[in-house]
Image (tube, rainbow, N blue to C red):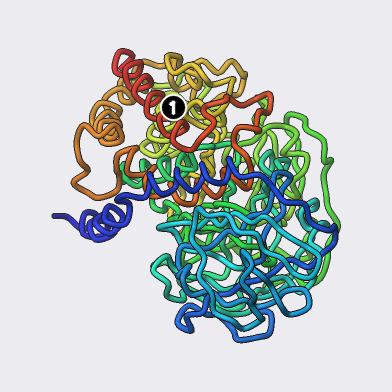
């Protein structure tokens, strides 16, 4: 067994053992929640709050700790969402209006230990107020509890620049405490995903911390997966990138339940932030060097509007001696280019935003623009494969570029023509790489514009500056792509379909991925109502978590059949 297999084998065994028998329990909990009517309650009444009675699972012992959970009001009734790590037979009543609460007629006071059964309905009452409460409990995934200093987070949910401070505690699915401490901030993030009701988030912990065995960091991202009703597309895409074994960095992930200000907010994919850092994409950190030389606020330069040849950024007072790297840039669409601080547009109209350094100087923007422009010129040259002109593959790493294209085709990626690129300082490595893989919820039939599994979307991209489509017009590139698909990605799809096992421990079957999130998916479905989510751009792939997993499996089978014939 090689090093990659050793890294993943233990985790794979653990995931398999924890995934058994959860599907039926999740379905019963969901069914109970959907069938139970609501009892009216007086508007504005204080809702009862609970904590775990087990001191081993407790975070801080404050009067209102971050991991206290309140019942949650929806239009169809009230719910008490419990994390997987709590013992439902040992709950402590933390608070209730007037300090007393009856549950199905039995009186309880604050501080009492009580037992509730997931899937059951209880009539809870305090004074003249009653709540008809359905109890649901997650399974197999950790829970993240965040309590902000200001309870009203409406501004943060609307504006990505608003940051809230507070506390964070994290409970593993087995009931052990993973993290408990201050939270520097939580904020919303994303472009199109920020427009959805269920917001994605970024947090910054007070100190660099390893979570769930991932590398230490302060910054972590919560992907909402709102467009992906199966909740596993992002995980599959990143595991496929890991399986390919050609990228220097692939973000690690962990499915979690998020409780925000004592209310269940939904199922999320906790991931490492896609960034240049020693524990992430480990290349020269130009942003850090910029910050060490420039204090305060500096004016922006360049026009914010999209136009070929455009450049924009921040007029820093001083540049580092070496501005050749590192850069993390994202190929994007014009309206996203216009929103970001730094970026450029190539002569053929492909816009790029500069993620790092976020505030790039005029010289830095001009430098990385020039690098990418030379690659584009060579890629679109009439002398594409000759020695008479500069070859794109002498500047852009061919392996990651081909693999990133094939991965986009395999996944029918709606944003597949717009990947990340990065470049280290010339003294370390002057090559540009097409990576990392990131944020892949809008794939494998989730989007109506990419719903047909028997069609090549990225190869047929008609945009003038589409780099992958241009490369695939050349036989040498297309032949290499076909061979890599047969050697790497066809076997990977067989693993996903359960037709073989992964000797490296990177990939599992669709059923195994689905079983791992069945418990959290059942809660998320109640919280956000899959069946009610029908935006115009997305398919209705199923009304239940089970139907969405089955849709995804069928789509992958159809996609594989098409790609097998193509390649």
Farthest front residue? 105
- For residue 437, say whether it is visible: yes
Which of these two is toward me, 38 or 557? 38
Q: Circle 1 sits on which residue?
A: 551
* The image quarter in which residue 439 lies: top right
Number of numbered discs present? 1
Position of 96 compared to 122: left or right? right
Question: For the C terminus, which image quadrant?
Answer: top left
Residue 159 coordinates in the image, percent (x, y) = 80, 53
Identify whether 409 is placed above or below 426. above
Residue at image location 81% in from the left, 70% down from the top: 296
Residue 357 coordinates in the image, percent (x, y) = 65, 57
Count neighbours of disc 1 (C-alpha within 10 A) and say few if under 14, some if 14 to 19, many if 20 or more. some
Which of these two is toward me, 216 or 529? 529
Residue at image location 59% in from the left, 81% down from the top: 112
Which of these two is toward me, 380 or 96? 96
Residue 440 coordinates in the image, percent (x, y) = 51, 39
- For residue 356, say whether it is visible: no
Question: For the N terminus, which image quadrant?
Answer: bottom left
């Amino acid at each position: 067994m090689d090093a990659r297999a050793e890294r993943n084998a233990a985790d794979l065994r653990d995931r398999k053992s924890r995934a058994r028998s959860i599907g039926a329990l999740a379905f019963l909990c969901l069914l109970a929640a959907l069938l139970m009517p609501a009892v009216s309650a007086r508007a504005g009444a204080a809702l009862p709050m609970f904590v775990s009675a087990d001191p081993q699972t407790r975070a801080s012992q404050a009067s209102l700790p971050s991991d206290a959970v309140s019942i949650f009001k929806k239009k169809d009734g009230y719910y008490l969402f419990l994390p997987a790590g709590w013992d439902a037979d040992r709950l402590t009543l933390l608070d209730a209006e007037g300090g007393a609460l009856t549950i199905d007629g039995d009186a309880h006071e604050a501080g009492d230990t009580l037992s509730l059964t997931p899937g059951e309905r209880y009539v809870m009452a305090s004074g003249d107020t009653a709540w008809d409460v359905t109890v649901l409990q997650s399974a197999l995934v950790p829970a993240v509890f965040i309590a902000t200093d200001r309870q009203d987070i409406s501004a943060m949910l609307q504006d990505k620049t608003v940051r809230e401070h507070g506390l964070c505690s994290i409970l593993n699915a087995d009931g052990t405490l993973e993290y408990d401490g201050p939270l520097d901030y939580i904020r919303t993030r994303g472009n199109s995903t920020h427009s959805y009701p269920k917001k994605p988030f970024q947090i910054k912990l007070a100190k660099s911390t390893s979570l769930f065995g991932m590398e230490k960091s302060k910054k972590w991202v919560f992907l909402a997966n709102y467009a992906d009703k199966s909740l596993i597309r992002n995980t599959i895409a990143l595991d496929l990138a890991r399986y390919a074994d050609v990228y220097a960095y692939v973000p690690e992930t962990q499915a979690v339940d998020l409780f925000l200000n004592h209310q269940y907010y939904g199922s999320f994919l906790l991931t490492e932030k896609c960034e240049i850092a020693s524990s992430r994409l480990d290349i020269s950190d130009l942003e850090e060097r910029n910050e060490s030389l420039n204090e305060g606020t500096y004016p922006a330069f360049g026009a914010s509007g999209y136009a070929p040849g455009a450049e924009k950024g921040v007029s820093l007072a001083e540049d580092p001696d070496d501005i050749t790297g590192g850069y993390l840039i994202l190929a994007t669409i014009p309206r996203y280019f216009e929103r970001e601080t730094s970026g450029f547009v190539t002569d053929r109209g492909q816009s790029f935003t500069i993620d790092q350094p976020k505030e790039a100087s005029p010289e830095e923007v001009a430098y990385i623009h020039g690098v990418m422009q030379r690659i584009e010129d060579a890629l679109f040259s009439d002398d594409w494969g000759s020695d008479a002109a500069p070859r794109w593959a002498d500047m852009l790493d061919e392996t990651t570029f081909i693999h990133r294209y094939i991965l986009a085709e395999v996944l029918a990626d709606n944003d597949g023509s717009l990947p990340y690129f990065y470049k280290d300082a010339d003294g370390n490595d002057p090559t540009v790489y097409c990576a990392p893989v990131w944020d892949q919820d809008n794939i494998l039939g989730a989007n109506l514009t990419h719903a047909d599994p028997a069609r090549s979307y990225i190869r047929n991209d008609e945009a003038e500056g589409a780099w992958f489509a241009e490369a695939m017009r050349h036989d040498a590139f297309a032949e290499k792509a076909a061979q890599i698909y047969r050697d790497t990605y066809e076997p990977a799809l067989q693993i996903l379909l359960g037709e073989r096992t992964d000797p490296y421990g990177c990939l599992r079957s669709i059923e195994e991925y689905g079983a791992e999130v069945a418990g959290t998916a059942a809660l998320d479905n109640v919280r956000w109502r899959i069946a009610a989510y029908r935006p115009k751009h997305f398919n209705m792939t199923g009304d239940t978590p089970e139907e969405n997993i089955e849709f995804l499996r069928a789509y992958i089978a159809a996609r594989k059949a098409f790609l097998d014939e193509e390649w």
